Amino acid sequence: MLNVSRHTKLLVAVLVLLCLIPLTQRKVVAQRGQQTPILDIQGMWNHNNLMTEERATLINAVGGGAKIGDYTGFPLNEAGRQQADSWMAARLELPEHQCHPHPAQYSLWGPGNFRISNIYDPLSDRIIGMRLQGTFGRADRVFWVDGRPHPPEYDRHTWGGFSTAVWDGNMLTVDTDHLKEGWFSRNGITTSDSATMREHYIKHDNYLTVVFFVNDPEKLAEPFIRTTQAVYDPTTVLNAQECQPFNTNVINADQPRGYVPHFLPGKNDQLKAFAETFGVPIEAARGEDKTLYPEYMVEIKKWAQAHEKTAPTTNETREKPATASRQAASAIK
């Protein structure tokens, strides 16, 4: 009786294994199909002076970057706008911020070239991930393509976040979470640590286009979208890994130890400078979600026509806003 019981158990175990083999094979085939790259995006990528947006051109070509009070194109909610309003550029001079790396939600938008390389499994030699290196501050990233799950929410958040990727035709789609709070425009516009990001890497000949979708329920009224591009260049040199801080003896010397530069609510007198200089409505510069859509051009036109009628015409007055408003009105007629 004991022998029959053992034979029965053995037979049941064999049948179970035979049933699992097709499932395992399908899983392996699916993983291998997912990990097989459609295009090879490895290499050295140069994106300095390639971006067409004014903010990026200023950063990469002549220095500077986004202007205080310029929230155009950002669908900020009240919390995101309030945090941006309180930001002061002198904060970047603090010792703890001088070596602040660019977070993933901004790194490919700022200066610095980058390198993409494959990560191989040491036993099977299959591609299990891709490494992106070289961005400012060297918050290097890894895109895992081996099907591993994302860690739990309470796990560590980093500048590069945790990313998984899949090939969708000739496009690599990357999903990232576990990001630290960090800027995505260097004028105080900041995402919270609840932000998530989806990127699409698309290669056309020697050009690489990256499309970003940033979601942040705490700071954004709706997803924020932007693009960047780079050109393949084997001669590209990456930024140094080490940080070179400023002379802290002369920075914020008139402030007590531990002071953090900031504006209190309603005290930032620089917020209107961008709108007045470029002749746009204050509302349009404040980054409301409705200002992102083509329908808002009707409001811009109404404002430009009204502003042109009421703008002073003497030579002693400021003519820049009036000129800009006339240009805005003529551009959308």
Image (cartoon, rainbow, N blue to C red):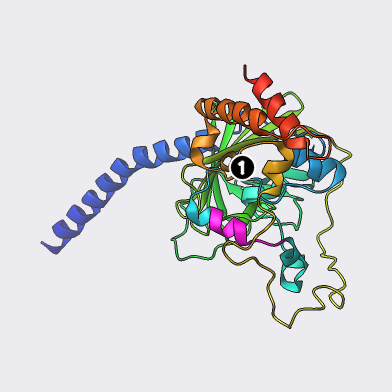
Please tell me which residue is depicted at 76% across the width and 32% down the height of the picture: 313
Q: Is residue 122 visible?
A: no
Q: Give the quarter of the figure containing the N terminus.
A: bottom left
Q: Secondary structure at mark 1?
A: helix
Q: What residue is at 62 percent from the left and 40 percent from the top? A: 72
Q: Main secondary structure of the magenta part?
A: helix
Q: Is residue 132 above or below residue 168?
A: below
Q: Is residue 324 above or below residue 175?
A: above
- The spot of residue 82 in percent (x, y) is 54, 58
Question: Which residue in the rendered view is the most extreme toward the front?
Answer: 314
Q: Nearer the viewer, residue 214 or 82?
A: 82
Q: Which residue is mark 1?
A: 285
Quadrant position of the C terminus in the picture: top right
Residue beneath the point at 40% across and 36% down: 26
In the image, is residue 265 part of the stretch drawn in magenta?
no
| Numbered range of the magenta stretch | 81-88
When the figure is inspected, residue 206 is found, relative to residue 91, above or below; the finding is above
Q: Is residue 161 left or right of residue 257?
A: left
| Residue 134 in view of the camera | yes
> For the image shown, how many numbered marks are present on the structure?
1
Quarter location, residue 89: bottom right
The residue at 63%/59% (across/down) is 159
| Residue 317 x %, y % | 79, 40
| 157 on left or right of 246 | left
Foreground residue among 259 and 218? 259
What's the amino acid at mark 1?
A: Ala
Is 60 situated left or right of 55 in this image? right
Image location (x, y in percent) of residue 266: 58, 61
Question: Camera-side residue: 204 or 118?
Answer: 204
